[in-house]
Image (cartoon, rainbow, N blue to C red):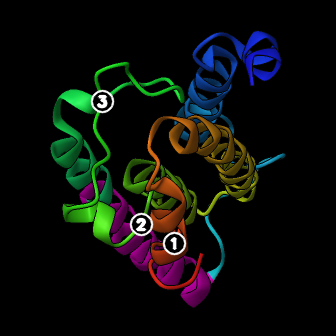
Amino acid sequence: MEEIAQRRGARGELYVLAQLGLLALVAFGPHALGPGGTWPGLWGQAARIAGVVLALTGGLFAMAGVLHLGSNLSPWPRPKEDSELVRSGAYRFVRHPIYTGLIFGSCGWALFVNGPLTLLYAFLLIVLLDRKARYEEQWLRKKFSDYAGYQREVKRFIPFIY
């Protein structure tokens, strides 16, 4: 475990830096490779509506995750020394509601701006957050004896699915 921590930073700093970079690309990066605007007709409009719904849902997940974590909140995958396992609130539905919020929000934004490149950035963020969550869960299993049971009961990002 310590060897893994040395490669990614003692608390997982490399994951946090990569996450911030991808979030910046989602928010401010180019939406498409060349000139062109939104997706045509009804597809573009439907994507915008779906994007708003997805982004708002993501915002709610992220806010609920932050509120229920309270003093346990940390940007690092490695939990704080004095942290407690939170299984209430949003954590009853997914193990990582803040990550869920970032994923839903990023995908929602990509749909809203009708951006194929933004969808690619959001996909890369999903892959990164999945790896970050797996890394974080190694620490959580080590710190909390009942975390493995929690993992069996509650999905990682999408309630009842994944």
> What's the amino acid at mark 2?
Val
Q: Nearer the viewer, mark 3 or mark 1?
A: 3
Rendered position, 139 above or below 14: below
Q: Tag 1: residue type? A: Lys
Please tell me which residue lies in front, 107 or 17: 17
Residue 71, how many percent across, how many down? 19, 28
Return the disc, 3 or 1, that comes first in the chain's sequence.
3
Quarter of the image where one finds residue 11: top right
Residue, disc 3: 83
Q: Is residue 55 magenta?
A: yes
8, 127: nearer the viewer = 8
Badge 3 or badge 2: first in the primary sequence: 3
- Would you say 10 lies left or right of 92 here? right
Q: Is residue 101 above or below residue 6?
A: below
Compute the Cα span from label 3 to label 2: 18 Å
Furthest toward the bottom, the residue is 42
Whether label 3 touches label 1, CB < 8 Å: no
Q: Residue at x 76, y 53 (%)?
A: 120
Decide: few, some or many residues near mark 1? Use Cα within 10 Å; few <14, some 14-19, many ≥20.
some
Residue closer to the observer: 9 or 142: 142
Which residue is pictured at 31% across the width and 50% down the height? 62
Residue matched to label 2: 94
Stretch in magenta: 41-60
**Secondary element at tag 3:** loop
